[in-house]
């Protein structure tokens, strides 16, 4: 079975199960290693599928019936403040879905982030160093947008308040 077919079937399997499925169980089912499943889950998340990793296994958020709230926020800061900005959002239990910049030639450029834990943030920052990658915000003098998601509007309000206090929000 090809990788893209496996990921489609993996998504169907998650949709059909209200109970978490472990990486090991999924690996056995598809005849691959657990690491292949971890990579498949990461790729599915990057495509926008809300897959939760719990201590009992993987689960689609839609299967939980959890309503979330999202907001777009405009930020501006230098590269030295990236970790602090991302951690402020994460520590409140929110997810950072994406980053977008408005480029004068290409128009809107976006990247899926899907960061929801401090480990995700550390890996993202580690990969920028490992691959000597520039952040999208480096194209726009630090100005960028994020779509953030949380379990209620109050959490989003608290995040915005703290980002504003730190001077990371772009204001009119």
Image (cartoon, helix red, strand yellow):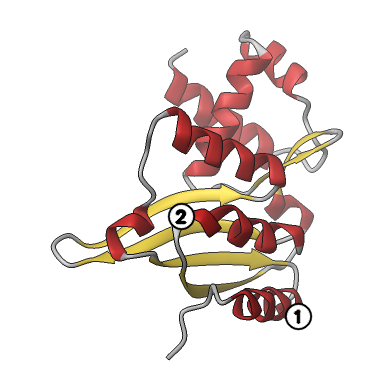
Mark 2 secondary-structure assignment: helix
Relative to 78, does residue 57 appear above or below in the rendering?
A: above
Q: Which residue is mark 2?
A: 79
The residue located at (37%, 59%) in the rendering is 137
Mark 1 secondary-structure assignment: helix
| Front residue of 122 and 98 | 122
Q: Quadrant of the C terminus?
A: bottom left
Image mark count: 2
Which numbered disc flags the more N-terminal residue, 2 or 1? 2
Residue 148 position within the rendered picture, expressed as x and y whole percent measured from the top left:
58, 65
Residue 71 position within the rendered picture, expressed as x and y whole percent measured from the top left:
56, 74
Residue 128 position within the rendered picture, expressed as x and y whole percent measured from the top left:
45, 38
Q: Is residue 169 left or right of 64 when viewed as pictured?
A: left
The residue located at (43%, 16%) in the rendering is 2
Relative to 137, does residue 168 appear above or below in the rendering?
A: below
The residue located at (52%, 66%) in the rendering is 147
Relative to 41, does residue 105 appear above or below in the rendering?
A: below
Q: Which residue is mark 1?
A: 154
The mark lying in front, picked from 2 and 1, is 2
Residue 53 falls in image quadrant: top right
């Amino acid at each position: 079975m090809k990788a893209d077919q496996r990921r489609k079937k993996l998504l169907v399997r998650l949709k059909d199960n209200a109970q978490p499925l472990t990486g090991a169980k999924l690996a056995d089912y598809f005849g691959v290693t657990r690491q292949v499943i971890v990579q498949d889950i990461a790729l599915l998340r990057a495509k926008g599928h809300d897959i939760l990793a719990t201590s009992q296994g993987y689960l689609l958020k839609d299967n939980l019936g959890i309503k979330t709230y999202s907001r777009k926020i405009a930020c501006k800061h230098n590269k030295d403040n990236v970790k602090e900005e991302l951690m402020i959002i994460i520590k409140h239990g929110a997810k950072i879905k994406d980053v977008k910049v408005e480029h004068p030639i290409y128009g809107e450029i976006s990247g899926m982030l899907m960061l929801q834990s401090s480990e995700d943030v550390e890996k993202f920052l580690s990969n920028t160093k490992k691959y000597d990658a520039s952040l999208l915000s480096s194209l726009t003098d630090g100005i960028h947008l994020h779509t953030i998601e949380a379990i209620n509007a109050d959490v989003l309000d608290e995040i915005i308040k703290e980002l504003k206090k730190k001077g990371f929000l772009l204001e009119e």
